[in-house]
Amino acid sequence: MRMNLPPNVNRIIHTLQENGFEAYAVGGCVRDSILGRVPGDWDITTSASPQEIKSLFSHTVDTGIEHGTVTVLMDREGFEVTTYRVDGDYEDCRHPKSVQFTRNLREDLLRRDFTINAMAYNDEDGLVDIFGGMEDLEKRMIRCVGCARERFREDALRIMRAVRFAAQLGFEIEEETKEAIRALAGNLRQISAERIQTELVKLMTSPHPELIREAYELGITAVILPEFDRLMDTTQETPHHFCNVGEHTIHVICAVRNDRILRLAALFHDFGKPDMKSIDAEGVAHFTGHGKRSEEMTRVILKRLKFDNYTLRNVCKLVLYHDYHYKTKATPENVRRSMAIIGEELFPYYIELRRADMMGQSEYRRAEKMANLHLVEQYYHETLEKGDCVSLKTLAVTGKDLIEAGIQQGKAVGETLEKLLDAVLSDPEKNTKEELLKLI
């Protein structure tokens, strides 16, 4: 097998080889090249020590030199070059207490997580595949290198990576690997929130986000997202639904396009339903107020997982208003008002999430709901085309105008602007400076 390595990767490998060292492209870049995917980055492994690497290249950065990693800079691009190593004991289910450099490629590959990530390549030797990575690629299988329990005890984050790789590649997880995950999922409690967040987002934005169901079945969500497990236990005795809240959520996640904000909003949109569930005298379930409760829970979870404020703000708003037009008739004014509440930029996301939410429900009254949403979307586009004001940003008067007109500086200015916006949302024709000053 021959791969087309980038010129700079070949230059680094050849430089190391010409000076008596072994060197290979290794890991995910080899896997992706075999699969016909474009690697995100290229990692190189070598028998040379960090100091020997540094002596051979004029521009290097000590990015992780204590673990044997030196970044070699070529044409303003960085390539991580890491010395073959053997990891010492793992103390925190994540990091080795020590590393020992070795001249043996097999020992280096043995410490890696999955067989498909434990292959190396250079043009001289071709593919080095000691642990059956090619066979597992052909079988579309995620399997640990060596003993699965040992690999997961070393680094518990590999538990989430197994499901994430399966979701990204459309692969199955091998049975022994699954059993090890079930046994050791609790070790994820020792992994940092930031790492959990990264893997959760990669799972949600993969081609197969429905594999969150597998994360649930393997006991992963019970540790990292126990709120999801409650969804899987919450039935929906209503003609509007055909499955439990968790399965409905999975349908919605798969029905929205692959966008980080949308997928996360789809994941969290019904998290409040277990808390808000009630059953009436006829045995019909109701979830009144679940949007507000879901937003409160989403805010807590996103903070717990250390999400940035931009994500928190937008996901929470979509969750809060995800069923805003469920019982609200679609009229131009109602759409303008909902645009003012949800935000002009976020409104298309709301429409997408609302449509996906309906697609995850039963056929009961679906045509009626879809027709209403179609009108919402139509009026939204008409509002944009007309340039109607839906926020204080495009109101024809400013706070300065109000002060000049005699409004006392302070709280009264903001309150007056809100009242004027309310008037303009009812009648867009009033959005002129002259008209609005008359209203004052």
Image (tube, rainbow, N blue to C red):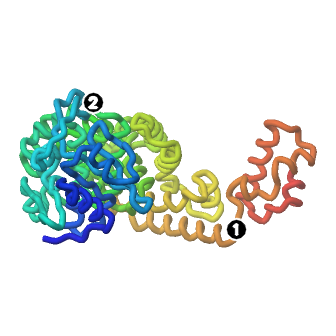
Of all residues, the one furthest to the top in this rendering is 91
Residue 48 falls left or right of residue 299: left
Name the residue that disc number 1 marks. Answer: 387
Callout 2 crowding tier (Cα within 10 Å): few <14, some 14–19, many ≥20: few
Q: Amino acid at mark 1?
A: Gly
Secondary structure under tag 2 reads helix
Residue 60 falls left or right of residue 103: right
- Residue 376 in percent (x, y) is at 54, 65
- Residue 206 in percent (x, y) is at 31, 58
Callout 1 crowding tier (Cα within 10 Å): few <14, some 14–19, many ≥20: few
**What's the distance in space between the residues labelled 2 and 1, CA to CA?**
52 Å
Q: Residue at x 29, y 38 (%)?
A: 230
Q: Nearer the viewer, residue 158 or 27?
A: 27
Q: Nearer the viewer, residue 386 or 42?
A: 42
Q: Residue at x 34, y 54 (%)?
A: 57
Q: Residue at x 18, y 67 (%)?
A: 123
Residue 261 falls left or right of residue 210: right
Q: Is residue 190 above or below residue 349?
A: above
Q: Amino acid at mark 2?
A: Gln
- Looking at marks 2 and 1 on the same chain, the residue that comes earlier in the sequence is marked by 2
Name the residue that disc number 2 marks. Answer: 190
Q: Residue at x 61, y 51 (%)?
A: 341
**Residue 196 makes an appearance in the image:** no
Secondary structure under tag 1 reads loop
- Residue 265 in percent (x, y) is at 42, 50
Q: Quadrant of the N terminus?
A: bottom left
Q: Is residue 310 above or below residue 9?
A: above
